[in-house]
Image (tube, rainbow, N blue to C red):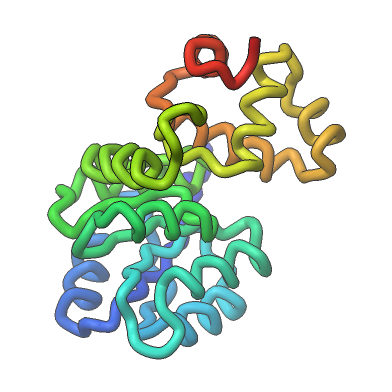
Amino acid sequence: MTEVTETRVIVADDQAAVREGLVLLLGTMPGIDVVGEAGDGDEAIRLVAEHRPDVVLMDLNMPGTDGIEATRHIRREHQDTQVVVLTTYATDELALEALDSGALGYLTKSASKDAIARAIAAAAAGQAVLDPDVQRSLVRAATRSQPATQPPADGLTAREIDVLKLIAAGHGNREISKRLFISGTTVKTHINRIFAKTASKDRVEAIAYAKRHHYVD
């Protein structure tokens, strides 16, 4: 009989009622094991180092070390742990900053139980999940920050553009890893973020996007 592997999750939110509610909610979801709960970014960092979870469900607005900085630290020190942001607002700047800090998913607290479950499962598998409002926020933020003559307002980071160009040139993950001196896991993370930000389902659509928006000739 095949053993079912549970996704180990830490919940980080400074509001005790919200945090406890999320823990109870996750406890009703099959395949999820909540191994810790944190009231601020510093505690989240400590618990990740202690428990090495698969996913952290991270609020952004917390006292002391906020969710952005905590995410940045966790992704730098524990690359096997993914972060899904679950926060009240999806402002343009917050969405960009959270994704640039290393978050693989971004949901608002209005997300349904099923949406949260899907985001956790996707993140554990190294796949990006963004709330539709967040995708629109990325477009708005990038539109304001780039001149009209620049590439499209998709919120892609410089590294993600590098990866997109290599995908469009026909390179596989292993070759991209060698050329950019990054791990295979990091390549997959970048590709999933590219897919999410450009609304591409696969490499073919991402290549078409790159050509359509003049990232490549």
Answer yes or no: is residue 120 visible.
no
Q: Position of residue 175 (x, y in %)?
A: 82, 26
Q: In this view, does 120 lie above or below 212?
A: below
- Name the residue at 41% across, 78% down: 66
Please give left or right for residue 113 compared with residue 179 in the image.
left
- Name the residue at 48% across, 86% down: 42
Tell me where residue 79 sits by quadrant. bottom right
Tell me where residue 207 sits by quadrant. top right
Q: Position of residue 202 (x, y in %)?
A: 50, 17
Camera-nearest residue between 143 and 133: 143
Quarter of the picture containing the C terminus is top right
Camera-nearest residue between 51 and 30: 51
- Name the residue at 43% across, 19% down: 201
- Name the residue at 39% across, 42% down: 142
Q: Is residue 18 above or below residue 148?
A: below
Q: Where is residue 83 in the image (x, y as percent from the top left)?
A: 46, 58
Tell me where residue 85 sits by quadrant. bottom left
Camera-nearest residue between 185 and 194: 194
Answer yes or no: is residue 22 visible.
yes
Camera-nearest residue between 6 and 26: 26
Q: In this view, does 206 lie above or below 60?
A: above
